Image (spheres, coloured by chain):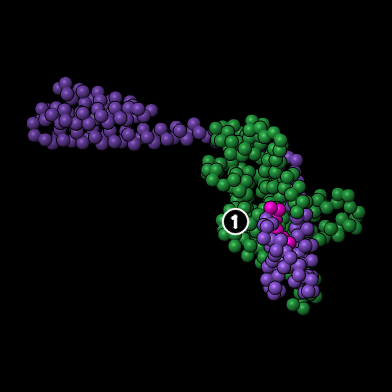
Amino acid sequence: MAIVGERRATLIPQPPATEVNATLWPSDTALVARVLEGDLEAFGVILARHQGRVYSIAANFAANSDDASDLAQDIFLKAYRSLRSFRGQAAFSTWLYRIAVNACVDYTRRRSHAALVPLDDDLLLAECDQGLGPEQAAERRQLRADLARAIGGLSTKLRAALILHDVEGLTHEEISRIVGCSVGTTKSRLFRAREEVRRRLAPPSEETEK
Amino acid sequence: MKCNRARRLANELIMAAPGEAAPRDSAATQELDQHLWSCARCRAEAAELRALRSRLRELGDRPAPDNLAARAMSALRLERFRRLRRAPLRRTALYLRRAVVAGAAAAAIAGAGAYLARNLPGGSNSQAAVSANVAPLLMEYADFRGAQPFGDRDGMLMVRAHVEEGQRR
């Protein structure tokens, strides 16, 4: 849990705990207001703040790193265009991740083959080979490719639930607000998604025994 | 505890996201631990889940490319520039549409007045009478539409001049 906590902190930079200055570290809502008044640079701050998580979500749906970048950029463009529809009822991140998930689901529908091969070698190479020997790196790459393929075979609803909760570390409540369903439905989808992934990752012999 | 319940509980507890562990979970954890101690199959499944959890969390460690923010901002600036460039054209089209509608309405009113003047008994006197009745309406309309830009205002001024000439006769 500590690992995920640290990761979340790096994905969404937080203000210094001791001195939270509204001018130096404006809230997302304040930044949105500035963008709506015509300050485009304020959107740059929003972008820098959320790009890590948005890219991570996109990369788990995209077929390769280029698609992941394009998808993440597309998500921010969509967010900018529909900024007036953000009323501040939910957290800005919830609103943004809803756009991200919808864009990713659209992408998956447009490219049905993306569900079969979710990650390409470039993406895996870039991530896995840091500080590992060639054999270890190859093994780890294979494991991640298998896992990504197993996730890619899920339906978009199960996939979104699994990525948001088990990969990104969001809570059931956050996911239910993002996806627009009850907490119970989210839990049920997650359970089914994990069962499906475990079944796909199981060695063939074990699978036939069942 | 039965195996089905243990599986559900293991799913919730082992795969919990940060900040999801509620106080009641400590009791549930103890209950699950007792079951896992006695059931080899559930113990194996729990181990599988723990392995899956760490592998899934690794997938989230993907830093965004360095140029993502710059690319997105460039795309935004371009889109904004295009929108600003198109804005005057859209305004002109809107004004032209309004002018055409106002012109058509004015022509219809003037035409109706002329028709009544020609067909009512009394000749030019009746034309003057009709003009006198229609004039206030036209004036009001001209005042209302006079605020609109382009040919609309000119059209209304012509109508006004026409009506005033009729009144003088």
Q: Position of residue B10 (x, y in %)?
A: 72, 66
Q: Which residue is drawn at 79% across and 62% down?
A: B51
The residue that mark 1 highlights is A176
Task: Determine the image quadrant of residue B124.
Answer: top left
Residue B16 magenta: yes
Where is residue A18? Give x, y as percent: 71, 35
Quarter of the image containing the C terminus of chain A? bottom right
Q: Where is residue A112 in the image (x, y as percent from the top left)?
A: 65, 60
> What colour is chain B?
purple
Image: magenta residue range: B13-19
Q: Is residue B141 left or right of residue A101?
A: left
Check disc 1: other Cα within 10 Å, few if <14, some if 14-19, many if 20+: some
Q: As displayed, is residue A185 above or below residue A64? A: below
Q: In the image, is residue B75 part of the stretch drawn in magenta? A: no
Q: Residue at x 81, y 61 (%)?
A: A143
Q: Is residue A196 visible?
A: no
Q: A189 or A134, which is in the foreground?
A: A189
- Tell which chain the image draws in green: A
- Given residues B165 and A137, the one toward you in this image is A137
Does A49 sit left or right of A138 as displayed? left
Q: Is residue B161 visible?
A: yes
